[in-house]
Amino acid sequence: MAKEPRLKAVRDAYKVTKEVKPWIASALIAIFLVIWVIGIGIGLYFGHPVYTGFIFLPLATLGSLFFFTRVAGAAAYQSIEGQAGAGASVLMAIRKGWVTTPAVAVNRNQDMVHRSVGRAGIVLVGEGGPSVRTLLTEERKKTERFAPNVPITELIVGDDEGQVPLRKLQKRLTKMPKKLSAAQMNEVRHRLKAVGGLSMPIPKGPMPKNVKIPKR
């Protein structure tokens, strides 16, 4: 039974990767064959091609899977990049230590702010155009009223200077130093739970890092 969700995750990841990287199947087959042929070649040199071919068969499979995980991770981000709510999708994929409320603030330009709470404090993540900075400032003031004296960090998703690329957003949060105890964190979450957020469509799809995608 446990294998079924894992196989489904592999299929989903492959489907997303295939849409973004149409050459992935050819690349996986080529990597598998190259490693296997190298193994057989080594076997021919030592006079045991069948034995080394058998040994290199799982190694060729692992090599292909390793390459696939790397490509699938980049493809997963690329498949949702630019969509409204992409930042929330990545944040909500963090399985441990963080609770994210998507779209706590949205303006008419579809700029939005997401709120994540963890041991590092409160992180407000904005995505959208230049006006998202104003939205972040307003949301920070509102958050400070409900959670005074709690560290608040503001981040903007993007590739410009001072912004955090979508593919690095998870790592940025998980590497932040802890400033709250577990009890304090739970209290902050309880306070902010009443504030809530808006109902916004979140891009779906297998996310890398903390989400189940094929394991090598």
Image (tube, rainbow, N blue to C red):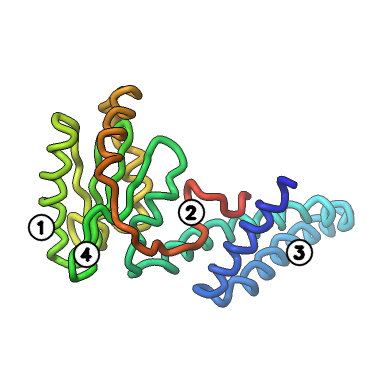
Looking at marks 4 and 1 on the same chain, the residue that comes earlier in the sequence is marked by 4
Of the residues tagged 4 and 3, which is closer to the observer?
A: 4
Nearer-the-camera pick, 34 or 44: 34
What amino acid is labelled 3 in the image? Val
The span from disc 4 to disc 2 (Cα, nearest Å) is 24 Å
Task: Specify the label residue 134 is tagged with.
Answer: 1
The span from disc 4 to disc 3 (Cα, nearest Å) is 52 Å
Task: Specify the label residue 111 is tagged with.
Answer: 4
Q: Quadrant of residue 16?
A: bottom right
Label 4 secondary element? loop
Q: Residues within 10 Å of mark 2 (few under 14, many from 20)?
A: many
Nearer-the-camera pick, 13 or 200: 200
The span from disc 3 to disc 1 (Cα, nearest Å) is 59 Å
Name the residue: 44% across, 49% down: 93
Query: Circles 3 and 2: CB distance less than 8 Å?
Result: no
Direction from residue 32 to residue 179 in the image, left or right = left
Q: Quadrant of residue 11?
A: bottom right
Q: Residues within 10 Å of mark 3 (few under 14, many from 20)?
A: some
What amino acid is labelled 2 in the image? Pro
What amino acid is labelled 4 in the image? Asp
Look at mark 2 in the image and give the residue it sits on: 208
What amino acid is labelled 1 in the image? Thr
